[in-house]
């Protein structure tokens, strides 16, 4: 099998040269070889090999020779499937035959002549099949030298001038804009030939005043008028009017497809064919009909430009008009947006190279800047709702049921009373988001304020903000996809433009905002260095330092953070939290403590441990006196008959404290979901087995014997419990391996909502605690998320 040559042994296990990936063991390697990516590349390689065997290299013909003339000449040797010409690097062509026999016949001919010239024909050069590297893809786009930019902005007299210099360095030049306009005109002319009265409308970065060098050209193909033309043409055919001499209607080019009933895939297929066959300079055309927004991607060779074409995406065009208006309302908007975007890219918070990815995109960053400017005091920008109220009757606009009304000219909007300069506004941006509660809020530009996330939890019926006039199918949408960062589109209130952002990106964004806010308080930010040292934006733009998290030099604490993530919660729990209002954090923390307790007791088979006798002395000597009170008030929770420790509530006054009889031995204390939850809990536990050692191998063997479907580690509590039991049964005699304490607290407010679990060893004579904690770092958050997702 040819694929066997793609695999070689490596220090990390096995390496697949075809897919450029590592597999740690044979089982993972077999799963990879059967996977879609590897199989697709194998088929693609076989196809490329067959094309090379059926192709010949031709050169020496006249420069004005066309593909058709070459195809007609070589047709005498066999059916020709394709002719590829490249007149930029030299006059040559690749002629591909449908059958190998045609290739052999053409090569057997000793001499070939066309138009009186002797042409050269030889076998096509064979090249090894290889994936295009990401680095090669990125180098095709020109980039601005960071050193040059740093030098230029260092020469500026103030941070305000530096921010204006950033705009000059990155914005689209007039020549870039004119070149894009010419390409749009070319596409308009070509598509009009096939789709009468259609419109090619640019949107996005190219025209919203926030474009940068080599940004993609985003286009909308509006076919609403074309549908009307086609409908009218069909009526004419039925009546026999407006027919040409051959008896066909004048719009017969559309006879192969009915735009009124055609699927997106069929329309995109037509667009793809027009681009490939009728637009000179266009190549690498790809149709993505299964994407959230079906699109055709293409490249334009002369401008080294990437482009996208979507169908009837009028909402995107309206969004572009909105950004144009916002940009014109205040001259400080563009410098602030360009600066924040470049800062985010340098800190590796933004810049998904191929569209999708876990980082912030430029559109989301732009909306964050606009939202901040809506919330400064006094506001720099009005809310979308305020803009809607300023629109006149002619400016009223409803698209797909969403009210997209706003004034068409900035002059219709009152001027802001805010007089802060760019330097102060940038400082304010970082301060604002260093304290912003993303997990508990949804950013709403329409209302110009943060909405509580509880308003969006548990929505299984029509949303209160569902647009009037939308169809029933749209009204059943449960709302935006919730994630670590939630930013509502200004008009489509069901779309979270940051729905792709990962928890790691959110944490990094918060950390970098805190670091930037701290730097903006220093003299190095505000004042130019007299000694020529870097200052202002130069130091702010310093690339992300991977070691910044530990630069304080403190010893790493044994903490595990479990963030609040609404997207993984069960539907019933989302409804509970939605009805809890502002107390949803503590309510969630109570459920999380129950899940943590279940993981330790039922999954990992931990048992309660006797707390050290000197624990009271430890608390008196500088730790938490509150814990001492808890330990003294609840002595039964450390008894051996207790199945495990539950969260111990904060001490209450004597008259409010429950009696000891309310929590008999043998029953674990549970957090009452109807009561005010504590913000701290702790467990004292013992683990007498190495449940982390060889766990994956035991798990694989168990699944093979039971013939259950393989699932990722931590995705099924019953399977993980059985794995633990298998490990315990294999060990000879249980022994006192280690004892440890877990202190849990919920962190909320302006920070990320999360539960922080602090681990400390109370008895580790065998030295296994570090290994156990390292295992828990990955296993515990996954297992808790799984339990919360299934909680009823």
Image (cartoon, helix red, strand yellow):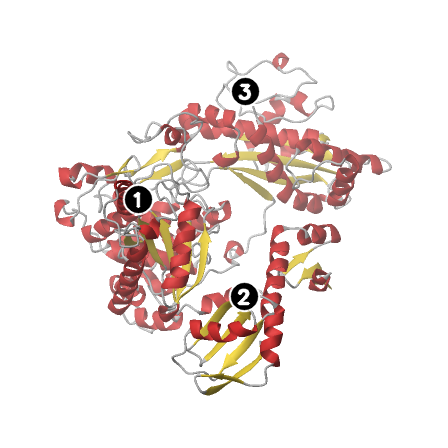
Q: Position of residue 240 (x, y in %)?
A: 26, 44
Q: Residue at left 42%, top 60%?
A: 346
Q: Residue at left 54%, top 20%?
A: 672
Q: Is residue 731 above or below residue 352?
A: above
Horizontal placement of 91 versus 594: left or right? left
Q: Is residue 381 above or below residue 647?
A: below
Per the model, the C-alpha gap separating discs 1 and 3 is 47 Å
Residue 424 image-quadrant placement:
bottom left
Question: Which of the two discs, 2 and 1, labels the residue nearer the N terminus?
Answer: 2
Local SS, label 1: helix
Q: Which residue is mark 3?
A: 672
Question: Which of the two discs, 1 and 3, labels the residue nearer the N terminus?
Answer: 1
Residue 53 image-quadrant placement:
bottom right
Contact check, label 1 and label 3, Cβ < 8 Å: no
Local SS, label 3: loop
Per the model, the C-alpha gap separating discs 2 and 1 is 34 Å
Q: Position of residue 698 (x, y in %)?
A: 77, 41
Q: Can residue 612 be seen here?
A: no
Q: Is residue 255 above or below residue 567?
A: below
Q: Position of residue 232 (x, y in %)?
A: 26, 43
* Residue sitting nearer the eye, 123 or 495: 123
Q: Position of residue 710 (x, y in %)?
A: 69, 40
> Which quadrant of the figure contains the C terminus?
top right
Contact check, label 3 and label 2, Cβ < 8 Å: no
Q: Which residue is mark 2?
A: 132
Q: Which residue is mark 1?
A: 315
**Would you call the spot at circle 1 few (<14 residues within 10 Å), some (14-19), or many (20 or more)?**
some
Horizontal placement of 328 versus 723: left or right? left
**Would you call the spot at circle 3 few (<14 residues within 10 Å), some (14-19), or many (20 or more)?**
few
> Which quadrant of the figure contains the N terminus?
bottom right
Local SS, label 2: loop
């Amino acid at each position: 099998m040819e694929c066997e040559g793609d695999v070689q042994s490596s220090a990390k296990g096995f390496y697949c040269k075809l897919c450029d990936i590592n597999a740690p063991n044979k089982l993972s390697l077999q799963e990879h070889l059967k996977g879609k990516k590897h199989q697709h590349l194998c088929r693609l390689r076989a196809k490329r090999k067959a094309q090379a065997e059926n192709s010949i290299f031709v050169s020496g013909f006249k420069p004005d020779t066309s593909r058709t003339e070459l195809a007609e000449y070589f047709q005498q040797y066999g059916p020709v499937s394709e002719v590829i010409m490249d007149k930029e690097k030299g006059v040559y062509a690749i002629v591909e035959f449908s059958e190998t026999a045609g290739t052999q016949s053409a090569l057997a001919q000793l001499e070939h002549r066309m138009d009186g010239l002797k042409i050269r024909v030889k076998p096509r050069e064979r090249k090894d099949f290889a994936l295009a590297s990401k680095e090669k893809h990125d180098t095709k786009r020109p980039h601005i030298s960071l050193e040059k930019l740093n030098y230029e902005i260092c020469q500026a007299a103030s941070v305000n001038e530096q921010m204006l210099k950033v705009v000059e360095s990155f914005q689209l030049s007039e020549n870039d804009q004119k070149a894009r306009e010419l390409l749009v005109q070319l596409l308009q002319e070509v598509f009009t030939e096939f789709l009468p009265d259609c419109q090619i409308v640019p949107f996005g970065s190219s025209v919203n005043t926030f474009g940068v060098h080599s940004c993609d050209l985003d286009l909308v193909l509006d076919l609403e008028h074309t549908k009307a033309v086609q409908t009218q043409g069909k009526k004419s055919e039925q009546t026999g009017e407006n027919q040409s001499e051959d008896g066909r209607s004048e719009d017969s080019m559309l006879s192969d497809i009915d735009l009124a009933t055609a699927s997106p895939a069929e329309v995109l297929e037509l667009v793809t064919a027009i681009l490939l066959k009728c637009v000179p300079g266009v190549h690498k055309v790809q149709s993505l009909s299964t994407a959230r927004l079906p699109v055709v991607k293409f490249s334009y060779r002369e401008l080294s430009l990437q482009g996208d074409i979507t169908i009837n995406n009028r909402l995107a065009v309206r969004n572009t008009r909105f950004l144009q208006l916002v940009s014109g309302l205040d001259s400080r908007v563009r410098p602030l947006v360009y600066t924040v975007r470049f800062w985010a890219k340098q800190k590796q918070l933004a810049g998904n190279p191929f569209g999708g990815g876990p980082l912030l995109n430029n559109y989301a960053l732009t909306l964050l800047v606009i939202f901040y400017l809506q919330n400064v005091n006094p506001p720099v920008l009005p809310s979308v709702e305020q803009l809607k109220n300023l629109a006149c009757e002619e400016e009223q606009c409803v698209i797909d049921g969403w009210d997209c009304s706003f004034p068409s000219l900035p002059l219709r909007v009152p001027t802001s009373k805010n007089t802060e300069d760019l330097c102060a506004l940038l400082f304010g941006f970082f301060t604002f988001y260093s304290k912003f509660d993303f997990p508990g809020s949804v950013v709403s530009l329409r209302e110009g304020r943060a909405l509580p996330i509880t308003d969006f939890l548990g929505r299984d019926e029509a949303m209160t903000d569902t647009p009037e006039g939308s169809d029933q199918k749209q009204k059943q949408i449960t709302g935006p996809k919730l994630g670590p960062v939630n930013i509502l589109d200004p008009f489509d209130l069901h779309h979270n433009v940051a729905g792709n952002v990962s928890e790691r990106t959110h944490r990094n964004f918060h950390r970098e905002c805190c670091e930037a806010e701290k730097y903006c308080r220093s003299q190095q930010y505000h004042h130019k260095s007299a000694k020529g040292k870097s200052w202002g934006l130069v130091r702010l733009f310093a690339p992300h330092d991977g070691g910044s998290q530990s630069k304080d030099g403190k010893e790493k604490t044994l903490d595990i953070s479990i963030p609040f993530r609404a997207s993984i919660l069960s539907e019933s729990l989302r409804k509970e939290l939605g009805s809890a209002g502002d107390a949803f954090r503590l309510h969630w923390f109570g459920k999380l403590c129950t899940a943590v307790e279940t993981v330790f007791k039922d999954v990992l088979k931990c048992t309660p441990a006797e707390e050290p006798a000197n624990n009271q002395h430890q608390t008196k000597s500088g730790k938490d006196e509150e814990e001492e009170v808890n330990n003294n008030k609840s002595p039964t929770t450390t008894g051996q008959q207790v199945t495990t420790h539950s969260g111990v509530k904060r001490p209450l006054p004597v008259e409010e404290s429950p009696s000891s009889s309310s929590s008999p031995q043998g029953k674990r204390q549970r957090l009452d979901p109807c009561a005010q939850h504590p913000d701290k809990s702790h467990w004292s536990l013992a683990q007498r087995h190495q449940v982390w050692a060889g766990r994956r191998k035991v798990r694989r063997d168990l699944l093979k014997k039971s013939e259950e479907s393989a699932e990722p580690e931590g995705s099924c509590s019953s399977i993980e419990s059985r794995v633990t039991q298998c490990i315990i049964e294999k060990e000879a005699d249980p022994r006192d391996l280690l004892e440890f304490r877990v202190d849990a607290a919920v962190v909320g407010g302006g920070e990320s909502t999360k539960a922080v679990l602090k681990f400390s060893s109370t008895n580790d004579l065998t030295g296994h605690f570090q290994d156990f904690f390292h295992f828990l770092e990955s296993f515990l958050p996954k297992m808790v998320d799984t339990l919360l997702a299934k909680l009823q």
